[in-house]
Amino acid sequence: MRLALPSIVSNITVPLLGMVDVAIVGHLGDAAYIGAISVGSMIFNIIYWLFGFLRMGTSGMTSQALGRRDLSEVTRLLVRSVAVGLAVALAILLLQYPIRLTAFWLIAPEAEVRSLAADYFSICVWGAPAMLVLYGLTGWYIGMQNTRFPMVISIVQNVVNIMASFFLVFALDMGMRGVAAGTVIAQYTGLLLSLFLLFSSYGRLRKYMVTEGLFAWDKMLIFFKVNSDIFLRTVCLVAVNLYFLSAGARQGAVLLAVNTLLMQLYILFSYVMDGFAFAGEALCGKYYGASNKVLFDSTIRRLFGWGGVMALIFTILYMLGGQEFLKLLTDDDKVVCAAADYFPWAIAIPFCGVAAFIWDGVYIGITATRKMLWSSVVSSLVFFGGWLCLYTSWGNHALWLSFILYLLARGLLQTYYYCNKKL
Protein backbone atom coordinates (compact mmCIF):
# COMPACT_ATOMS: atom_id res chain seq x y z
CA MET A 1 0.00 0.00 0.00
CA ARG A 2 2.97 2.32 0.56
CA LEU A 3 3.73 1.89 -3.14
CA ALA A 4 0.16 1.66 -4.42
CA LEU A 5 -1.43 4.68 -2.73
CA PRO A 6 0.95 7.35 -4.10
CA SER A 7 0.57 5.79 -7.54
CA ILE A 8 -3.22 5.94 -7.23
CA VAL A 9 -3.06 9.59 -6.21
CA SER A 10 -0.77 10.46 -9.12
CA ASN A 11 -2.67 8.33 -11.62
CA ILE A 12 -6.06 9.70 -10.63
CA THR A 13 -4.90 13.21 -11.54
CA VAL A 14 -4.41 12.08 -15.14
CA PRO A 15 -8.04 11.15 -15.93
CA LEU A 16 -9.22 14.06 -13.80
CA LEU A 17 -7.14 16.33 -15.97
CA GLY A 18 -8.62 14.79 -19.10
CA MET A 19 -12.07 15.27 -17.62
CA VAL A 20 -11.32 18.91 -16.90
CA ASP A 21 -10.20 19.39 -20.51
CA VAL A 22 -13.43 17.72 -21.69
CA ALA A 23 -15.45 19.88 -19.28
CA ILE A 24 -13.74 23.07 -20.51
CA VAL A 25 -14.49 22.42 -24.16
CA GLY A 26 -17.83 20.82 -23.27
CA HIS A 27 -19.06 24.24 -22.17
CA LEU A 28 -17.97 26.06 -25.33
CA GLY A 29 -21.34 25.33 -26.91
CA ASP A 30 -20.75 22.64 -29.57
CA ALA A 31 -20.37 18.84 -29.48
CA ALA A 32 -17.58 19.26 -32.08
CA TYR A 33 -15.29 20.59 -29.34
CA ILE A 34 -15.76 17.40 -27.31
CA GLY A 35 -15.08 15.33 -30.41
CA ALA A 36 -11.98 17.38 -31.21
CA ILE A 37 -10.46 17.00 -27.75
CA SER A 38 -11.17 13.27 -28.00
CA VAL A 39 -9.47 12.98 -31.40
CA GLY A 40 -6.53 15.21 -30.48
CA SER A 41 -5.84 13.56 -27.14
CA MET A 42 -6.27 10.09 -28.65
CA ILE A 43 -3.54 10.81 -31.21
CA PHE A 44 -1.10 11.64 -28.43
CA ASN A 45 -2.31 8.76 -26.31
CA ILE A 46 -1.47 6.50 -29.25
CA ILE A 47 1.97 8.03 -29.68
CA TYR A 48 2.80 7.86 -25.98
CA TRP A 49 1.24 4.42 -25.50
CA LEU A 50 3.41 3.07 -28.31
CA PHE A 51 6.50 4.27 -26.49
CA GLY A 52 5.20 3.40 -23.04
CA PHE A 53 7.95 0.76 -22.91
CA LEU A 54 10.22 3.60 -21.81
CA ARG A 55 8.36 3.47 -18.51
CA MET A 56 7.24 -0.15 -18.28
CA GLY A 57 10.44 -1.79 -19.46
CA THR A 58 12.55 0.51 -17.32
CA SER A 59 10.57 -0.20 -14.15
CA GLY A 60 10.71 -3.98 -14.55
CA MET A 61 14.43 -4.16 -15.35
CA THR A 62 15.31 -1.58 -12.68
CA SER A 63 13.37 -3.39 -9.94
CA GLN A 64 15.07 -6.67 -10.82
CA ALA A 65 18.53 -5.03 -10.82
CA LEU A 66 17.69 -3.48 -7.43
CA GLY A 67 16.65 -6.91 -6.13
CA ARG A 68 20.09 -8.22 -7.20
CA ARG A 69 21.74 -5.13 -5.63
CA ASP A 70 23.36 -4.30 -8.97
CA LEU A 71 23.47 -0.52 -8.56
CA SER A 72 25.74 0.01 -11.56
CA GLU A 73 23.13 -1.52 -13.82
CA VAL A 74 20.45 0.53 -12.06
CA THR A 75 22.16 3.76 -13.11
CA ARG A 76 22.87 2.55 -16.63
CA LEU A 77 19.21 1.64 -17.15
CA LEU A 78 18.22 5.22 -16.35
CA VAL A 79 20.65 6.67 -18.89
CA ARG A 80 19.59 4.20 -21.60
CA SER A 81 15.91 4.97 -21.11
CA VAL A 82 16.39 8.75 -21.21
CA ALA A 83 18.64 8.53 -24.28
CA VAL A 84 16.13 6.39 -26.19
CA GLY A 85 13.29 8.73 -25.14
CA LEU A 86 15.08 11.78 -26.54
CA ALA A 87 15.82 9.98 -29.81
CA VAL A 88 12.17 8.96 -30.21
CA ALA A 89 10.97 12.50 -29.40
CA LEU A 90 13.25 13.96 -32.09
CA ALA A 91 11.80 11.52 -34.63
CA ILE A 92 8.24 12.53 -33.67
CA LEU A 93 9.01 16.23 -34.13
CA LEU A 94 10.59 15.61 -37.52
CA LEU A 95 7.67 13.45 -38.69
CA GLN A 96 4.83 15.43 -37.12
CA TYR A 97 3.13 16.34 -40.41
CA PRO A 98 2.81 12.77 -41.81
CA ILE A 99 1.84 11.53 -38.35
CA ARG A 100 -1.03 14.02 -38.22
CA LEU A 101 -2.21 13.21 -41.75
CA THR A 102 -2.13 9.47 -41.07
CA ALA A 103 -3.99 9.83 -37.78
CA PHE A 104 -6.77 11.91 -39.34
CA TRP A 105 -7.05 9.45 -42.23
CA LEU A 106 -7.48 6.55 -39.82
CA ILE A 107 -9.94 8.29 -37.48
CA ALA A 108 -11.83 10.11 -40.26
CA PRO A 109 -13.48 12.83 -38.11
CA GLU A 110 -15.97 15.32 -39.52
CA ALA A 111 -14.53 18.50 -41.08
CA GLU A 112 -15.24 20.76 -38.08
CA VAL A 113 -13.80 18.24 -35.61
CA ARG A 114 -10.76 17.74 -37.85
CA SER A 115 -9.97 21.48 -37.98
CA LEU A 116 -10.15 21.89 -34.20
CA ALA A 117 -8.13 18.73 -33.58
CA ALA A 118 -5.43 19.98 -35.99
CA ASP A 119 -4.99 23.11 -33.87
CA TYR A 120 -4.63 20.94 -30.77
CA PHE A 121 -2.07 18.64 -32.42
CA SER A 122 0.15 21.38 -33.84
CA ILE A 123 0.82 22.72 -30.33
CA CYS A 124 0.85 19.55 -28.23
CA VAL A 125 3.43 17.80 -30.42
CA TRP A 126 6.15 20.06 -28.96
CA GLY A 127 5.64 18.44 -25.57
CA ALA A 128 6.92 15.08 -26.85
CA PRO A 129 10.52 15.47 -25.54
CA ALA A 130 9.28 16.29 -22.04
CA MET A 131 6.77 13.43 -21.97
CA LEU A 132 9.10 10.71 -23.24
CA VAL A 133 11.94 11.65 -20.90
CA LEU A 134 9.41 11.72 -18.06
CA TYR A 135 8.38 8.17 -19.00
CA GLY A 136 11.92 6.93 -18.48
CA LEU A 137 12.34 8.81 -15.22
CA THR A 138 8.97 7.62 -13.88
CA GLY A 139 9.71 3.99 -14.73
CA TRP A 140 13.08 4.26 -13.00
CA TYR A 141 11.53 5.75 -9.86
CA ILE A 142 8.96 2.93 -9.71
CA GLY A 143 11.69 0.34 -10.17
CA MET A 144 13.54 1.97 -7.27
CA GLN A 145 10.43 1.38 -5.10
CA ASN A 146 9.71 5.11 -5.05
CA THR A 147 6.19 6.03 -6.13
CA ARG A 148 6.15 9.25 -4.10
CA PHE A 149 8.19 11.23 -6.63
CA PRO A 150 5.91 10.34 -9.57
CA MET A 151 2.97 11.34 -7.36
CA VAL A 152 4.42 14.78 -6.59
CA ILE A 153 5.42 15.32 -10.21
CA SER A 154 2.01 14.30 -11.52
CA ILE A 155 0.10 16.47 -9.06
CA VAL A 156 2.21 19.56 -9.81
CA GLN A 157 2.06 18.92 -13.54
CA ASN A 158 -1.71 18.54 -13.60
CA VAL A 159 -2.42 21.50 -11.32
CA VAL A 160 -0.30 23.66 -13.65
CA ASN A 161 -2.15 22.21 -16.64
CA ILE A 162 -5.59 22.95 -15.24
CA MET A 163 -4.68 26.48 -14.18
CA ALA A 164 -2.96 27.30 -17.47
CA SER A 165 -5.80 25.85 -19.56
CA PHE A 166 -8.49 27.78 -17.67
CA PHE A 167 -6.52 31.01 -18.00
CA LEU A 168 -5.69 30.58 -21.69
CA VAL A 169 -9.19 29.46 -22.70
CA PHE A 170 -11.40 31.76 -20.64
CA ALA A 171 -9.16 34.78 -19.93
CA LEU A 172 -7.34 34.95 -23.27
CA ASP A 173 -10.12 33.35 -25.33
CA MET A 174 -7.72 30.93 -27.05
CA GLY A 175 -10.24 28.08 -27.34
CA MET A 176 -8.78 24.70 -28.30
CA ARG A 177 -5.30 26.20 -28.67
CA GLY A 178 -5.43 27.31 -25.04
CA VAL A 179 -6.10 23.75 -23.83
CA ALA A 180 -3.16 22.49 -25.92
CA ALA A 181 -0.78 25.22 -24.76
CA GLY A 182 -1.67 24.54 -21.13
CA THR A 183 -0.78 20.89 -21.65
CA VAL A 184 2.67 21.69 -23.07
CA ILE A 185 3.46 24.18 -20.30
CA ALA A 186 2.61 21.55 -17.69
CA GLN A 187 4.66 18.82 -19.41
CA TYR A 188 7.88 20.83 -19.23
CA THR A 189 7.09 21.88 -15.67
CA GLY A 190 6.85 18.19 -14.75
CA LEU A 191 10.14 17.40 -16.50
CA LEU A 192 12.05 20.16 -14.68
CA LEU A 193 10.66 19.05 -11.32
CA SER A 194 11.54 15.42 -12.03
CA LEU A 195 15.14 16.29 -12.90
CA PHE A 196 15.44 18.38 -9.74
CA LEU A 197 14.21 15.48 -7.59
CA LEU A 198 16.53 13.06 -9.37
CA PHE A 199 19.72 15.04 -8.80
CA SER A 200 18.81 16.13 -5.29
CA SER A 201 17.84 12.66 -3.99
CA TYR A 202 19.81 10.16 -6.08
CA GLY A 203 23.02 12.08 -6.69
CA ARG A 204 24.91 9.55 -4.53
CA LEU A 205 24.34 6.89 -7.18
CA ARG A 206 26.68 8.69 -9.55
CA LYS A 207 29.59 6.83 -7.96
CA TYR A 208 28.10 3.58 -9.28
CA MET A 209 27.88 4.91 -12.82
CA VAL A 210 30.23 2.99 -15.11
CA THR A 211 30.25 4.30 -18.67
CA GLU A 212 31.97 1.19 -19.98
CA GLY A 213 29.32 -1.04 -21.47
CA LEU A 214 26.66 1.65 -21.11
CA PHE A 215 25.43 1.04 -24.64
CA ALA A 216 27.01 -2.39 -25.07
CA TRP A 217 25.32 -4.51 -27.72
CA ASP A 218 24.31 -7.35 -25.38
CA LYS A 219 22.78 -4.97 -22.83
CA MET A 220 20.97 -2.95 -25.47
CA LEU A 221 19.73 -6.19 -27.05
CA ILE A 222 18.10 -7.20 -23.75
CA PHE A 223 16.72 -3.66 -23.34
CA PHE A 224 15.15 -3.69 -26.81
CA LYS A 225 13.98 -7.31 -26.62
CA VAL A 226 11.91 -6.57 -23.53
CA ASN A 227 10.77 -3.27 -24.92
CA SER A 228 9.94 -4.62 -28.39
CA ASP A 229 7.48 -7.08 -26.83
CA ILE A 230 5.92 -4.23 -24.84
CA PHE A 231 5.87 -2.07 -27.98
CA LEU A 232 4.07 -4.72 -30.05
CA ARG A 233 1.69 -5.44 -27.17
CA THR A 234 0.95 -1.73 -27.01
CA VAL A 235 0.32 -1.67 -30.77
CA CYS A 236 -2.50 -4.15 -30.14
CA LEU A 237 -3.94 -2.01 -27.35
CA VAL A 238 -3.65 1.12 -29.48
CA ALA A 239 -5.34 -0.61 -32.42
CA VAL A 240 -8.33 -1.44 -30.23
CA ASN A 241 -8.60 2.05 -28.73
CA LEU A 242 -8.04 3.76 -32.07
CA TYR A 243 -10.68 1.67 -33.81
CA PHE A 244 -13.07 2.24 -30.90
CA LEU A 245 -12.68 5.99 -31.42
CA SER A 246 -12.83 5.72 -35.19
CA ALA A 247 -15.99 3.58 -35.14
CA GLY A 248 -17.64 6.16 -32.89
CA ALA A 249 -16.52 9.04 -35.12
CA ARG A 250 -18.03 7.35 -38.18
CA GLN A 251 -21.42 7.28 -36.42
CA GLY A 252 -21.53 11.07 -36.08
CA ALA A 253 -20.50 13.79 -33.62
CA VAL A 254 -23.13 12.86 -31.01
CA LEU A 255 -22.13 9.19 -30.67
CA LEU A 256 -18.45 10.20 -30.74
CA ALA A 257 -19.17 12.54 -27.83
CA VAL A 258 -21.14 9.79 -26.03
CA ASN A 259 -18.30 7.28 -26.33
CA THR A 260 -15.79 9.92 -25.25
CA LEU A 261 -17.76 10.70 -22.09
CA LEU A 262 -18.32 7.04 -21.17
CA MET A 263 -14.67 6.22 -21.78
CA GLN A 264 -13.83 8.72 -19.05
CA LEU A 265 -15.33 6.17 -16.62
CA TYR A 266 -13.07 3.45 -18.02
CA ILE A 267 -10.05 5.74 -17.85
CA LEU A 268 -10.84 6.72 -14.26
CA PHE A 269 -10.98 3.07 -13.16
CA SER A 270 -7.90 2.11 -15.18
CA TYR A 271 -5.71 4.75 -13.59
CA VAL A 272 -6.80 3.74 -10.09
CA MET A 273 -6.02 0.11 -10.86
CA ASP A 274 -2.70 1.08 -12.40
CA GLY A 275 -1.69 2.25 -8.92
CA PHE A 276 -1.84 -1.38 -7.78
CA ALA A 277 -0.23 -2.50 -11.04
CA PHE A 278 2.71 -0.16 -10.38
CA ALA A 279 3.09 -1.65 -6.92
CA GLY A 280 3.06 -5.07 -8.57
CA GLU A 281 5.80 -3.98 -10.99
CA ALA A 282 8.04 -2.76 -8.19
CA LEU A 283 7.51 -5.58 -5.70
CA CYS A 284 7.15 -8.55 -8.05
CA GLY A 285 10.20 -7.40 -9.98
CA LYS A 286 12.22 -6.99 -6.80
CA TYR A 287 11.22 -10.39 -5.35
CA TYR A 288 11.69 -12.05 -8.74
CA GLY A 289 15.18 -10.57 -9.02
CA ALA A 290 15.94 -11.74 -5.47
CA SER A 291 14.46 -15.23 -6.20
CA ASN A 292 12.03 -14.91 -3.26
CA LYS A 293 9.05 -17.00 -4.41
CA VAL A 294 7.17 -16.77 -1.08
CA LEU A 295 6.91 -12.99 -1.13
CA PHE A 296 6.33 -13.01 -4.89
CA ASP A 297 3.23 -15.22 -4.60
CA SER A 298 2.03 -13.32 -1.53
CA THR A 299 2.22 -10.04 -3.43
CA ILE A 300 0.04 -11.43 -6.24
CA ARG A 301 -2.62 -12.59 -3.76
CA ARG A 302 -2.72 -9.19 -2.10
CA LEU A 303 -2.93 -7.41 -5.44
CA PHE A 304 -5.99 -9.40 -6.45
CA GLY A 305 -7.58 -8.92 -3.04
CA TRP A 306 -7.35 -5.16 -3.36
CA GLY A 307 -8.36 -5.34 -7.02
CA GLY A 308 -11.61 -7.09 -6.12
CA VAL A 309 -12.40 -4.48 -3.49
CA MET A 310 -11.78 -1.61 -5.91
CA ALA A 311 -13.88 -3.23 -8.64
CA LEU A 312 -16.82 -3.52 -6.22
CA ILE A 313 -16.46 0.10 -5.08
CA PHE A 314 -16.35 1.48 -8.62
CA THR A 315 -19.31 -0.61 -9.75
CA ILE A 316 -21.42 0.78 -6.91
CA LEU A 317 -20.26 4.35 -7.58
CA TYR A 318 -21.06 4.13 -11.27
CA MET A 319 -24.50 2.64 -10.60
CA LEU A 320 -25.43 5.34 -8.08
CA GLY A 321 -23.82 8.47 -9.48
CA GLY A 322 -22.62 7.82 -13.00
CA GLN A 323 -25.38 9.71 -14.80
CA GLU A 324 -24.89 12.82 -12.67
CA PHE A 325 -21.15 12.56 -13.28
CA LEU A 326 -21.73 12.81 -17.04
CA LYS A 327 -23.69 16.02 -16.52
CA LEU A 328 -20.64 17.56 -14.88
CA LEU A 329 -18.67 16.97 -18.08
CA THR A 330 -21.14 18.51 -20.49
CA ASP A 331 -24.35 20.55 -20.48
CA ASP A 332 -25.37 19.21 -23.89
CA ASP A 333 -28.68 17.45 -23.08
CA LYS A 334 -28.71 15.59 -26.38
CA VAL A 335 -25.36 13.94 -25.60
CA VAL A 336 -26.33 13.09 -22.00
CA CYS A 337 -29.63 11.52 -23.10
CA ALA A 338 -27.94 9.48 -25.82
CA ALA A 339 -25.35 8.23 -23.30
CA ALA A 340 -28.06 6.67 -21.11
CA ASP A 341 -28.62 3.85 -23.63
CA TYR A 342 -24.99 2.76 -23.38
CA PHE A 343 -24.36 3.39 -19.70
CA PRO A 344 -24.78 -0.28 -18.58
CA TRP A 345 -21.63 -1.15 -20.52
CA ALA A 346 -19.65 1.35 -18.45
CA ILE A 347 -20.97 -0.28 -15.26
CA ALA A 348 -19.56 -3.63 -16.43
CA ILE A 349 -16.03 -2.29 -16.89
CA PRO A 350 -14.62 -2.69 -13.33
CA PHE A 351 -15.22 -6.41 -12.83
CA CYS A 352 -14.51 -7.29 -16.45
CA GLY A 353 -11.22 -5.38 -16.55
CA VAL A 354 -9.67 -5.77 -13.09
CA ALA A 355 -7.64 -8.93 -13.82
CA ALA A 356 -6.04 -7.45 -16.94
CA PHE A 357 -4.74 -4.43 -15.01
CA ILE A 358 -3.33 -6.48 -12.12
CA TRP A 359 -1.60 -9.02 -14.36
CA ASP A 360 -0.05 -6.28 -16.47
CA GLY A 361 1.81 -5.02 -13.41
CA VAL A 362 3.01 -8.51 -12.46
CA TYR A 363 4.16 -9.41 -15.97
CA ILE A 364 5.97 -6.09 -16.45
CA GLY A 365 7.75 -6.48 -13.11
CA ILE A 366 9.14 -9.90 -14.03
CA THR A 367 9.61 -8.87 -17.69
CA ALA A 368 7.43 -11.77 -18.91
CA THR A 369 6.71 -9.57 -21.89
CA ARG A 370 6.23 -12.27 -24.53
CA LYS A 371 3.20 -13.68 -22.69
CA MET A 372 1.80 -10.16 -22.34
CA LEU A 373 2.18 -9.77 -26.08
CA TRP A 374 0.32 -12.99 -26.91
CA SER A 375 -2.54 -12.23 -24.54
CA SER A 376 -2.92 -8.81 -26.17
CA VAL A 377 -2.87 -10.26 -29.69
CA VAL A 378 -5.59 -12.81 -28.91
CA SER A 379 -7.80 -10.36 -26.99
CA SER A 380 -7.52 -7.81 -29.82
CA LEU A 381 -8.71 -10.46 -32.26
CA VAL A 382 -11.66 -11.06 -29.93
CA PHE A 383 -12.51 -7.34 -30.08
CA PHE A 384 -12.36 -7.03 -33.84
CA GLY A 385 -14.13 -10.36 -34.36
CA GLY A 386 -16.98 -9.35 -32.07
CA TRP A 387 -17.39 -5.99 -33.79
CA LEU A 388 -17.37 -7.43 -37.31
CA CYS A 389 -19.96 -10.06 -36.38
CA LEU A 390 -22.38 -7.76 -34.55
CA TYR A 391 -22.08 -4.18 -35.79
CA THR A 392 -24.71 -4.43 -38.53
CA SER A 393 -27.42 -5.41 -36.06
CA TRP A 394 -26.23 -3.88 -32.77
CA GLY A 395 -24.51 -0.68 -33.88
CA ASN A 396 -22.74 1.14 -31.08
CA HIS A 397 -23.79 -1.56 -28.59
CA ALA A 398 -21.67 -4.02 -30.57
CA LEU A 399 -18.70 -1.71 -30.12
CA TRP A 400 -19.09 -1.68 -26.35
CA LEU A 401 -19.74 -5.43 -26.07
CA SER A 402 -16.60 -6.13 -28.10
CA PHE A 403 -14.60 -3.86 -25.80
CA ILE A 404 -15.87 -5.66 -22.68
CA LEU A 405 -15.00 -9.07 -24.21
CA TYR A 406 -11.55 -7.72 -25.05
CA LEU A 407 -10.92 -6.79 -21.40
CA LEU A 408 -12.14 -10.19 -20.19
CA ALA A 409 -9.97 -12.07 -22.68
CA ARG A 410 -6.80 -10.25 -21.60
CA GLY A 411 -7.33 -11.09 -17.94
CA LEU A 412 -8.33 -14.71 -18.56
CA LEU A 413 -5.35 -15.47 -20.80
CA GLN A 414 -2.84 -13.98 -18.37
CA THR A 415 -4.46 -15.93 -15.52
CA TYR A 416 -4.09 -19.11 -17.59
CA TYR A 417 -0.39 -18.48 -18.21
CA TYR A 418 0.27 -17.91 -14.50
CA CYS A 419 -1.80 -20.85 -13.22
CA ASN A 420 -0.18 -23.23 -15.67
CA LYS A 421 3.34 -21.97 -14.90
CA LYS A 422 3.84 -20.79 -18.47
CA LEU A 423 5.57 -17.53 -17.57
Image: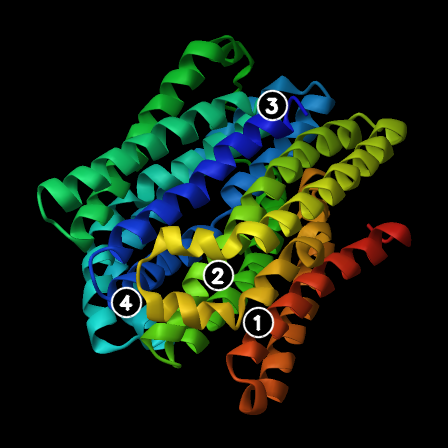
Residue at image coords 44%, 18%: 198
Q: Which numbered disc, 4 or 2, marks the residue that appears first in the sequence?
A: 4
Q: Spatial distance from mark 3 to mark 4, Cα to Cα?
A: 44 Å
How many numbered callouts? 4
> Circle 2 sits in a helix, a strand or a loop, which is it?
helix
Towards the viewer: 96 or 299? 299
| Residue named by callout 3 | 144
> Circle 1 sits in a helix, a strand or a loop, which is it?
helix
Residue at image coords 51%, 51%: 267
Horizontal and vertical percent for residue 60? 64, 36
Q: Are marks 2 and 3 in contact (CB under 8 Å)?
A: no
Q: What colour scheme has been applied to the protein in the rendered image?
A: rainbow
Q: Are marks 3 and 4 in contact (CB under 8 Å)?
A: no
| Residue named by callout 4 | 31
Quadrant occupied by the N terminus: top right
Q: Which numbered disc, 3 or 4, marks the residue that appears first in the sequence?
A: 4
| Residue named by callout 1 | 400
